[in-house]
Image (cartoon, rainbow, N blue to C red):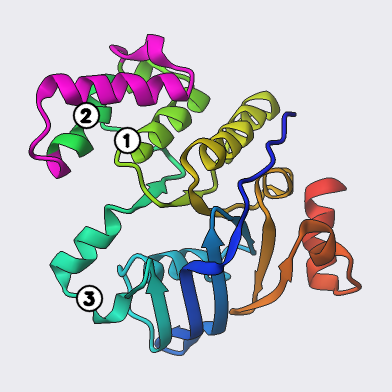
Amino acid sequence: MQIFKPHVINKEESVISITGLYKSFDDLDVLKGIDFNLYKAENVAVLGKSGSGKSVLIKIIVGLLKPDRGEVVVLGKHVNQLNRKELDDLRLHIGFSFQNSALYDSMNVLQNLTFPLTMNRKNLTKSEANDAAEEILDSVGLKDKLNQMPSDLSGGQRKRIGIARTLILKPQIMLYDEPTSGLDPVTSTEIIELINEVQQKYNTSSIIITHDLTCAKNTSNRIAMLLDGRFLKIGKFDEVFDTDDEQVKGFFNYNFIQ
């Protein structure tokens, strides 16, 4: 597996800053005091069991949920204080790669890629949108799939095109939701390499939600272990898993032993 060296991470510049974040649903406390920074050009993998609050955290970051307490600052904007238009403008700088790729089945690959451009860049001509789609598709190694339908593609190809559609708006932040879920080992390796290429080529900052420790280890500059509503440990892979904590060891053993 080819592992790319990341751009220099600027720890003086946080693209996401979270302080004292709490979120509950009725009597269920999901997030119980989250403090976290994502720095410019950094990839952080967020690990945690199902129901640990990973998805809730992401929804709060993009303003789909409001926290009960705490502060969330994204690209210098206080998310809780933004109106609808300001939130929409902020979201144009955040790319979300969905677990199921979220392609439109009725559109071919070219149409899937140009759709977000024509919706958000009203001044672009059709020719310019098509050129942008071809360029971004070439960057994920699938330029020959331009006129195919999503149903004709493999799971790995759909993942790549889903990432390409996200990148076409040139986001500063990428959010990956289980990018290797359901893929065979060879295709998973290709997606891992693509995530690294995206960081290198586009200088993105990324949060990678995953249960896959191979993905986490090979794409991230830091690991954040989310357990019981808090980040139990944040650090490099070896730092996080060099522990006697049975919860953390259990997560490691599930991936690499069972």
Dot 2 corresponds to which residue? Answer: 114
Tell me the distance, in whole angstroms, between the alpha carbons under discs 1 and 3.
Answer: 25 Å
Which percent across, then down, holds residue 37?
55, 71
Q: Is residue 196 left or right of residue 251?
A: left
What is the number of the mark on residue 241? none
Label 1: state its secondary structure: loop
Q: Amino acid at mark 3?
A: Leu
Q: Is 132 within the magenta?
A: yes
Q: Magenta stretch mostly in which secondary structure?
A: helix
Disc 2 to disc 1, C-alpha distance: 8 Å
Q: Which residue is mark 3?
A: 82
- Segment tinted magenta in the rendering: 119-148
- Determine the residue positioned at 52% across, 71% down: 53
Pick whichever of labels 2 and 3 is earlier in the sequence. Answer: 3
Q: Amino acid at mark 2?
A: Thr
Circle 1: is it few (<14), some (14-19), or many (20+) Cα within 10 Å? some
| Residue at image location 14% in from the left, 65% down from the top | 85
Return the disc, 1 or 3, that comes first in the chain's sequence.
3
Let me know if residue 106 appears in the view: no
Read off the residue under disc 1: 168
